[in-house]
């Protein structure tokens, strides 16, 4: 990983489109190796974000908290919204290999003001324009919990990574100076969980 994570144009790798169509066979064949199994699990989880069958209709503005919780369940995190808005932001993250995180904003009376799926390229671009220097609390309130966190090596701090709906083996990453509690940079990087299986397909 590098401290400066530059945004890169995206393309759809041909092997991804071909590999997911390959038949699964018995032991010792395609899909039986650990790397292939990890990649299959990755693609299965990612596929949920690509199909309408996994989607849940977003809550409508004005919906009360109780109705939201009855349909969506317990949020994965809660964040206080800054003044003058007040109220609360509820996070519904889909897990380490999930590719969606919904943020639902409630007003001070506990009614839905807005709902947004925040893991997408448009939101990442919006975030990147103002990312440098923000603290971890604001980062979490904006993108939600990351799929993975790990050390940034010799530069220190951490790299946080989020998967999102894409056909590429990429995730969105943020480099954080944990000592100063500020974001250094943000951009796209290779998702090594996906890329690790690319050489073990026979």
Image (tube, grey):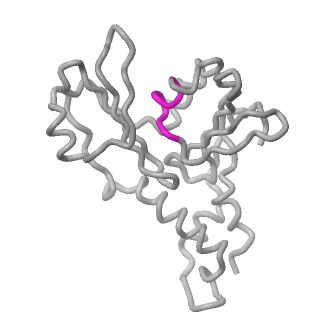
What number of labels is visible? 0
Please indicate whether residue 71 sits to the left or right of residue 79 in the image: left
Q: Going 53% across and 67% down the picture, which residue do you hit?
A: 41
Find the residue positioned furthest to the right.
154
Residue occupying the point 47% across, 28% down? 142
In the displayed image of the protein, which residue is found farthest to the front? 179
User: If the image is split into quadrants, where does the C terminus sit?
Assistant: bottom right
Q: Compared to 121, does 14 lie above or below? A: below
Nearest the viewer among 158 and 42 is 158
Please give the name of the residue rendered at 67% of the width and 30% of the height, measured from the top-left corner: 176
- Residue 33 location, x and y as percent? 66, 80
Q: What segment is highlighted magenta in the picture?
A: 138-145
Secondary structure mostly taken by the magenta-highlighted segment of the chain: helix
Question: Residue 64 vs residue 192: left or right?
Answer: left
Considering every residue shown, the one lying at the far top of the view is 84
Q: Is residue 16 above or below residue 89?
A: below
Quadrant of residue 81 in the image? top left
x and y, in percent, of residue 43 in the image:
52, 63
Membership of 20 in magenta stretch: no
Residue in view at x 15 percent, y 31 percent: 64
Q: Nearest the camera: 147 or 59? A: 147
- Percent across and percent down for residue 102 are 37, 39
Horizontal side of residue 79 vs 193, given as left or right: left
Question: Which of the 4 image quadrants contains residue 1?
Answer: top right
Residue 191 in percent (x, y) is at 65, 52
């Amino acid at each position: 990983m590098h401290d400066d994570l530059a945004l890169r144009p995206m393309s759809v790798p041909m092997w991804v489109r071909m590999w997911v169509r390959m038949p699964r066979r018995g032991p010792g064949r395609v899909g039986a190796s650990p790397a292939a199994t990890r990649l299959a699990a990755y693609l299965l989880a990612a596929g949920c974000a690509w199909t309408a069958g996994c989607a849940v209709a977003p809550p409508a503005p004005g919906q009360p908290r109780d109705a939201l919780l009855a349909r969506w369940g317990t949020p994965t995190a809660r964040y206080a919204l800054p003044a003058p808005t007040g109220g609360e932001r509820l996070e519904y993250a889909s897990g380490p290999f999930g590719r969606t995180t919904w943020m639902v904003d409630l007003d001070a009376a506990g009614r839905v003001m807005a709902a947004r799926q925040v893991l997408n390229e448009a939101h990442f671009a919006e975030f990147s324009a103002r990312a440098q220097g923000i603290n971890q609390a604001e980062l979490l309130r904006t993108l939600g919990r990351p799929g993975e966190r790990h050390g940034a090596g010799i530069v220190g701090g951490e790299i946080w990574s989020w998967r999102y709906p894409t056909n590429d083996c990429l995730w969105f990453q943020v480099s954080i100076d944990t000592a100063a509690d500020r974001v250094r940079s943000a951009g796209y990087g290779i998702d090594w969980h996906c890329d690790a299986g690319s050489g073990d397909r026979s």
